[in-house]
Amino acid sequence: MAKSERAILNAIVAFIRSEGGSFDTWYSGITSDVKSRLFGDHGVPEKDHWYIFRQAESSLSARKVELALLFKYGTDGEAKSATLV
């Protein structure tokens, strides 16, 4: 079920804070195919590894959450480097 931007941002920030580490050690991104992107492209192990994902109401909402994580909280991500070019 899709969640609001605020609910998604709050859930992800709370998860990162609870699992530890600084925000810049976490990667943020958006995709329409979580399993392929997360476990395939990025090689994240499905078990015994920290990750979180949420379904947004729209691609625009997803992008807003991603940008907040990148620029307000300082996570790493592909969109950050693309924006700086």
Image: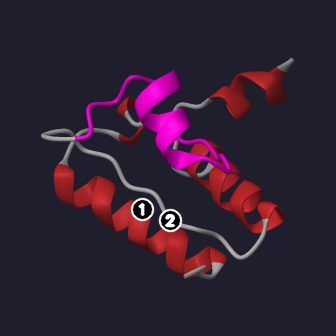
Mark carried by residue 4: none
Image quadrant in which you'd find residue 57: bottom right
Mark 2 to mark 1 CA distance (whole Å): 8 Å
Q: Nearer the viewer, mark 2 or mark 1?
A: 2
Q: Nearer the viewer, residue 68 or 47?
A: 47
Which amino acid type is shown beneath numbered disc 2?
Arg
Q: Which residue is mark 2?
A: 54
Horizontally, is 63 left or right of 24 in the view?
A: right
Any part of residue 75 in sight: no
Q: Which residues are magenta?
A: 28-46
Asked if the stretch drawn in magenta spans residue 77, the answer is no
Q: Residue at x 53, y 36 (%)?
A: 36
Horizontally, is 53 left or right of 80 in the view?
A: left
Determine the secondary structure under disc 2.
loop
Which amino acid type is shown beneath numbered disc 1?
Ile
Q: Quadrant of the N terminus?
A: bottom right
Q: Which residue is mark 1?
A: 12
Q: Quadrant of the C terminus?
A: top right
8, above or below 26, in the image: below
